[in-house]
Image (tube, rainbow, N blue to C red):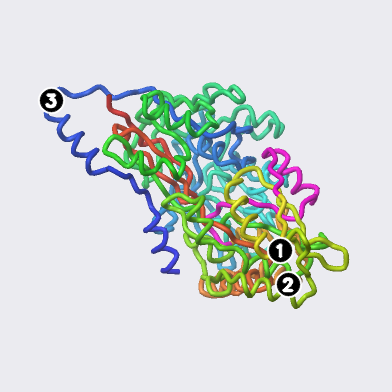
Amino acid sequence: MNSPKNRVLRWGIAPVGALAALGLLASCAAGPAASPKTDITMAVTGDPVCLDPQQVTLTTALNIGRQVVDSLIDQDAETGELVPWLAESWETNDDLTEFTFELRDDVTFSDETALTADTVVKNLDALFEMGSTASLASQYLAGYEGSTAVDENTVTVNFESSNAQFLQGASTITLGLVSDATTELSPEDRCQTVVGTGPFTIDSYVANDSVVIAKRVGYDWASELRGHSGEALVDTVTFPITPEAGVRTGGLQTGEFDIIQDLPAVDETRFDTADYNIYARGNPGMPTSLVPNTTRPVVSDEIVRKAMLLATDRAEITALTGSSQSQPASSALSSATPGYSSQEDAMAYDLDAATALLDDNGWVVGSDGIREKDGQRLTMSVTAFYGQDVLEATQIQLAKAGIDLQLNIVTAGDFFGAIATGDYDFLSASLTRTDPDVLRVTFSKDAVSKWAIIDDAELESLLTEQASTADTTERTALIAEIQEMIIDRAYLIPLLEVAQVHASTANVSGLTFDSSSRLIMYDVSVSE
């Protein structure tokens, strides 16, 4: 899996203007020492909706929640190596059905209760019982049989069959640990606040206004991947909810904001100066794509889906809508994902081939340019809650082949409601995960909260087999076969590999990404 790792290295943190910023700091060092800024502000793009990191999937919520909870283990964002965090060590049996963790004995939650093996058991049991309410967590716990506290600091987690992706899942924010008291709350109440072991605590949350987190006094169990030990370097971080891109960039220029989420692509050049840092990292997992419900009449036609795959010009979509850090999708996995296998040739843009497929299959171009067959117009809709610019570019391209793609832009709540009911032709979104099991989460009929609706026994068998294959080489081969099958049968129309791109003033340092491209603010400091 050397190729994916090289990709990750190229897509690592990229602070634009960093050398100039370092020069500025060096010149400041010659004079009187400046007092660091202890209360900072990061403008975010939307309301987190829920603060419980074990339930959420929205990027804003995950970026905030990562500061509040720690995980059993950590994953190096560049190498993929798993390292100790709340667990000092771990071991597995040969078939990956049993995982035993030895916990640190000095960790407490912000309510001053101790981290124990019993707490880990309560976390995993509560997560498993939440089912689809914790849609991502439930995938990491596929086949969960239960956990046992061997002693106060030793816990064993058991699965019915091999769970090849659980260890990586244990490094994610989704399996970050919360206090005993939090596990006893209803899912709704957990969304309002959460008690973790992290370097920050939730100070306040006003829906559609702001979230404030405060430094945890006495914190001293950071992962070895962090840049320092002890408490966080700032006292508070305020996250004003600022959906308007112009307000975020304007606030960064005036100094109202120290950091902003999602720097628009059109503004990257403007902020590529010594006065700012730009931070960028590609999302691993499934790229932004059209995800089909093949029970719908038009979508069920494989020829139509293949024509859509060929009529999509991903290079143009990237040029029109992506940041300088984005790149065209080239498989069912993003290139930053372990196990990625390029399907670029099979997905190559070919409008002539797309129109020939539709012609040969009896889809005739109508007077308005949209094809028809047996009285059925070649029209379908796509449901999404972000990425309208990407979908508009796709819509224009597909229209050239006589395909009418209608956009249904909804709220995040309505998007996940559509998933629950299956009421959609296509979904459009990406799904971030630093493990190729993201494909099972998306496509398997047995997944708790699947996105694609597909009836394919051969694909289902491969998805199940890779999830229970302990041998890395064998699993990688299965993942490659799955990617080839998904593209060959047009079960996904990949569009764009998304990158997280944020910006700060030049006096900010220490902002980093975790392996899932979520922000880590523990090492952040801001000089005056």
Left or right of 405, for residue 477: left
Magenta segment includes 496: no
Contact (Cβ within 8 Å) of mark 3 with mark 1? no
x, y percent for residue 488: 65, 74
Q: Mark 3 belongs to which amino acid?
A: Gly
Crowding around mark 2 (Cα neighbors within 10 Å: few <14, some 14 to 19, many 20+) is many
Q: Along the horizontal axis of the image, is 376 left or right of 251?
A: right
Q: Are marks 2 and 1 in contact (CB under 8 Å)?
A: yes
Query: Disc 2 residue type?
Result: Leu
- Which-is-in-front pick, marks 3 and 2? 2
Q: Tell me which segment is drawn in magenta.
A: 407-436
Question: What residue type is disc 1 on?
Answer: Gly
Q: CA distance from mark 3 to mark 2?
A: 71 Å
Give me the C-alpha separation between circle 3 and circle 1: 67 Å
- Queried whether the magenta region covers residue 424, the answer comes back as yes
Query: Under tag 3, what secondary structure?
Result: loop
Mark pair 2, 1: CA separation: 9 Å
Q: Residue at x 51, y 70 (%)?
A: 342
Quarter of the figure that contains the C terminus: top left
Q: Identify which residue is drawn at 44% across, 40% down.
A: 263
Say if 478 sits above or below 277 in the image: below
Q: Which residue is mark 1?
A: 402
Image position, residue 200 (x, y; %): 46, 30
Q: Which residue is mark 2?
A: 358
The relative height of residue 367 versus residue 350 in the rendered view (above or below) is above
Q: What is the x, y in percent for residue 394?
A: 61, 56
* Mark 3 surroundings: few (<14), some (14-19) or many (≥20) residues within 10 A: few
Name the residue beneath numbered marker 3: 31
Q: Residue at x 57, y 45 (%)?
A: 175
Answer with mark 2 or mark 1, whichever residue precedes in sequence: 2
Q: Position of residue 371 (x, y in %)?
A: 77, 64
Residue 435 circle label: none
